[in-house]
Image (spheres, rainbow, N blue to C red):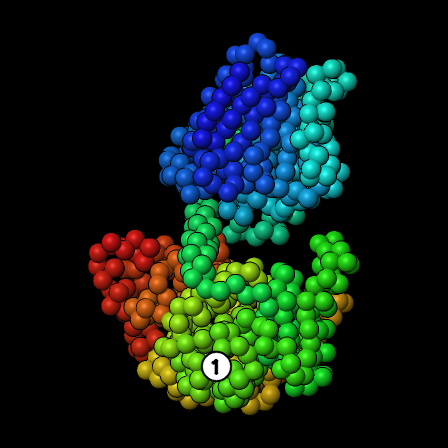
């Protein structure tokens, strides 16, 4: 038999074997889109009907197997009623089950990556051979759903319920060694031998040296657990996973429940249970919002990659300032393959920067993510120096010295004289105007902002700031460097605080007003953590550093006095005056003591209520938890709208991704503007009207009012 499609090609090999190859034309990766599924059904039908076929080999014509389902297409299915969505899932299940039910063995050669639906298809074949450098996994819970094409059914029967629960609930990627250990694959070989080894395994099965029928019987039968074992495995896992995932992320527990209900059933009944449970999860707000974050990430990445083409490739970089931030930038650059010179004026600072990079690398080695040899290679890409001797070779230099305008201007002017005329300069500043920083430069067109977030290795976002004189080449080159570092860059226009800090400080301003009305800061933290923030505003201020926040708050109050200036003393000022700088010196709104691993552990500090009590107004009215949420979130949403009106950022998608990746805004809410759309702009404007006594911080923008009147949202603007 022969089949030649746009996504799938089939050809006969000797000995009655047929090779089905996934190779999506005009694309760098294979994915399950509608066209691929349609062709797969057709190809499988032809194979089933051909009496000469006695064995099936499944391969990929790409550097990876299948990256998963095409989420951009399948979100349309999610809009259907639950029963229709479940029916569609079962139709795909029939295609996969047909492969599983073939009257001959089948083997998949897995290379590169196999995620989500790609791995689920692999599980339907009799055996799996995996290249040693391949990563596999079922990441669907990260989208608020779970495997819906037989993953909960087949993975639990192949690897055992406990392993399947860990893989599905965690949603992580896994290497070949682990996959072999738990039985997800049957062999691991060097990448160059994966097809050859798969053919050999197929020959063994066809010759009767492998009992592939017994393997199939295991996959289509109920799980081999007695009632007591079933209860212990699933009930214990549900309690543990529920505690870890929290109430805002229901899909991991729903996946376990689907597995549990299907454990005593045969394959087809279990698949029906999985499909129905998946359909319920797909209709939840959490799934909707997490999918929008996924799609937003793709959109932002696509914009960045397109822009980066207009820039120069950064082969070698430099960072000025070798503290924690400079060391983090050096680590991130070197670990992703770009050589970097790390300069400071003090040997002690260089030691600190290298220690930061070393610490991060050691952690990766300890977790098995990196070999000692690879760690050594990364460290050789970081060159510490007290001089500018190597700067003529760098393509881009990042200034990361103290957040002081005059100091930064002096350093930038100095380094400009040490680099090539075509080299790009970037400032890692969180609040200072890029346009003003460019004033003392001879080549301001080669300068822009590159704002990293702390800790650099964890926070995905980089704001690339376009000053008034910044050229497209400077911005594009910096975006390309951020991408090479594994970051998500968003281009913003110059303004005080740029995007993230500009919208963060109105949020803090809402907090300050509440504290000044006598609301307990610990209560505010608990309410906002319940809302979904990883930490409440007081705890966040401690982590950022009260001294840093005090400086930035002053900048924002000076630049936006109509809404960010404060009347009277604030909680931030009270902490700053007492040198309670937060985690960095062990006391802020909370006290911090090292835990067993040396990390700062938050504790209530009995001194703080007395510090804050003099700030509280005696005539303040009581507030509900919802009042706290509204008073914290409205200023942030309104300032996001102002950023769109002022063209600081191009789209609501970039605002939401910026806040999720730069601030840890609750992903399950989809971002500040998705949250605003969910509440409804009309309702938000009504809430703001009741709070107008608090000043312009709570005054809706013209954009918000216009959208509210039209019954639209930020993401529905016509």
Picture layout, residue 708 above or below residue 187: below
Residue 279 location in percent, x, y?
46, 36
User: In this figure, which residue is indicated by the disc labeled 1?
Assistant: 552
Image-quadrant location for residue 222: top right
User: In the figure, is residue 201 to the left or right of 50?
Assistant: right
Residue 418 location in percent, x, y?
56, 82
Residue 422 location in percent, x, y?
48, 74
Picture layout, residue 324 above or below residue 229: below
Residue at 44% across, 84% down: 442
Can residue 194 be seen at all in this image of the molecule?
yes
Image-quadrant location for residue 160: top right
Residue at 33% across, 55% down: 715
Picture layout, residue 670 above or below residue 603: above
Residue 141 location in percent, x, y?
55, 45
Depth order, front residue of 424/56: 424
Secondary structure type for disc 1: helix
Depth order, front residue of 652/706: 652
Characterize the local packing of mark 1: few (<14), some (14-19) or many (20 or more) Cα atoms within 10 angstroms: many
User: In the figure, is residue 635 to the left or right of 96?
Assistant: left
Image-quadrant location for residue 474: bottom left
Residue at 31% across, 77% down: 696
Residue at 64% across, 22% down: 106
Can residue 690 be seen at all in this image of the molecule?
no
């Amino acid at each position: 038999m022969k089949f030649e499609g746009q996504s799938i090609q089939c050809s006969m090999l000797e000995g009655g074997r047929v090779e089905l190859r996934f190779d999506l034309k005009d694309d760098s990766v294979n994915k399950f889109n509608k066209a691929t599924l349609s062709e797969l059904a057709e190809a499988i039908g032809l194979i089933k009907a051909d009496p000469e076929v006695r064995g099936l080999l499944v391969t990929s014509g790409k550097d990876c197997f299948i990256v998963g389902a095409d989420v951009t297409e399948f979100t349309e299915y999610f809009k259907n009623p639950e029963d229709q969505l479940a029916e569609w899932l079962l139709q795909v299940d029939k295609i996969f089950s047909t492969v599983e039910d073939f009257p001959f063995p089948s083997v998949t050669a897995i290379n590169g990556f196999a995620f989500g639906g790609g791995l689920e298809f692999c599980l339907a074949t009799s055996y799996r051979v995996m290249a040693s450098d391949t990563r596999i996994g079922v990441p669907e819970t990260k989208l608020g759903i779970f495997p819906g094409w037989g993953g909960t059914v087949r993975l639990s029967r192949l690897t055992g319920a406990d392993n399947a629960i860990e893989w599905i609930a965690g949603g992580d990627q896994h290497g070949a060694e682990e996959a072999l250990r738990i039985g997800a694959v049957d062999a691991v070989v060097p990448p160059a031998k994966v097809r050859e080894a798969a053919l050999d395994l197929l020959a063994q099965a066809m010759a009767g040296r492998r009992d592939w029928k017994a393997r199939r019987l295991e996959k289509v039968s109920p799980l081999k657990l007695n009632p007591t074992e079933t209860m212990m495995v699933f009930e214990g896992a549900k309690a543990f996973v529920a505690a870890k995932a929290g109430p805002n992320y229901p899909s991991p527990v729903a996946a376990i429940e689907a597995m549990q209900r299907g454990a005593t059933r045969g394959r087809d009944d279990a698949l029906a249970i999985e499909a129905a449970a998946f359909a319920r999860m797909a209709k939840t707000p959490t799934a909707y919002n997490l999918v929008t974050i996924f799609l937003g990430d793709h959109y932002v990445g696509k914009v960045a990659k397109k822009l980066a083409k207009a820039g120069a490739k950064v082969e070698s970089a430099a960072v000025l300032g070798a503290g924690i931030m400079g060391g983090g930038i050096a680590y991130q650059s070197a670990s992703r393959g770009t050589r970097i010179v790390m300069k400071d004026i003090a040997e002690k600072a260089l030691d600190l920067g290298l220690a930061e990079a070393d610490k991060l690398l050691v952690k990766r080695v300890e977790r098995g993510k990196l070999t000692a040899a690879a760690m050594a290679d990364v460290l050789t890409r970081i060159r510490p120096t007290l001089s500018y001797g190597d700067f003529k070779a760098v393509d881009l230099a990042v200034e990361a010295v103290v957040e002081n305008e005059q100091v930064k201007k002096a350093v930038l002017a100095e380094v400009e004289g040490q680099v090539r005329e075509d080299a790009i300069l970037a400032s890692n500043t969180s609040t200072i105007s890029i346009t003003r920083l460019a004033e003392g430069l001879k080549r301001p067109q080669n300068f822009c902002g590159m704002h990293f977030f702390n800790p650099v290795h964890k926070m995905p976002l980089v704001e690339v700031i376009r000053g008034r004189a910044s050229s497209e080449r400077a911005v594009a080159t910096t975006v390309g460097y951020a991408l090479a570092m594994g970051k998500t860059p968003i281009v913003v226009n110059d303004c005080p605080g740029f995007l993230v800090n500009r919208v963060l400080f109105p949020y803090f301003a809402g907090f300050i007003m509440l504290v000044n009305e006598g609301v307990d800061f610990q209560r505010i933290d608990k309410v906002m953590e319940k809302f979904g923030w990883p930490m409440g505003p007081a705890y966040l201020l401690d982590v950022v550093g009260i001294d840093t926040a005090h400086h930035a708050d002053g900048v924002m109050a000076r630049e936006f006095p109509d809404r960010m200036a404060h009347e009277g003393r604030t909680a931030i000022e009270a902490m700053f005056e007492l040198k309670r700088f937060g985690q960095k010196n062990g006391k802020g709104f909370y006290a911090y003591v090292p835990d067993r691993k040396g990390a700062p552990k938050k504790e209530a500090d009995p001194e703080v209520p007395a510090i804050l009590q003099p700030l509280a107004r005696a005539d303040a009215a009581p507030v509900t938890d919802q009042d706290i949420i509204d008073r914290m979130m409205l200023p942030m949403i309104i300032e996001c709208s102002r950023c769109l009106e002022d063209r600081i950022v191009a789209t609501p998608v970039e605002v939401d991704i910026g806040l999720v990746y730069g601030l840890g805004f609750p992903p399950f809410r989809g971002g500040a503007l998705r949250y605003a759309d969910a509440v409804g702009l009309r309702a938000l404007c009504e809430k703001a009207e009741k709070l107008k006594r608090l000043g312009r911080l709570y005054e809706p923008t013209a954009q918000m009012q216009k959208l509210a009147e039209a019954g639209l949202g930020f993401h529905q603007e016509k």
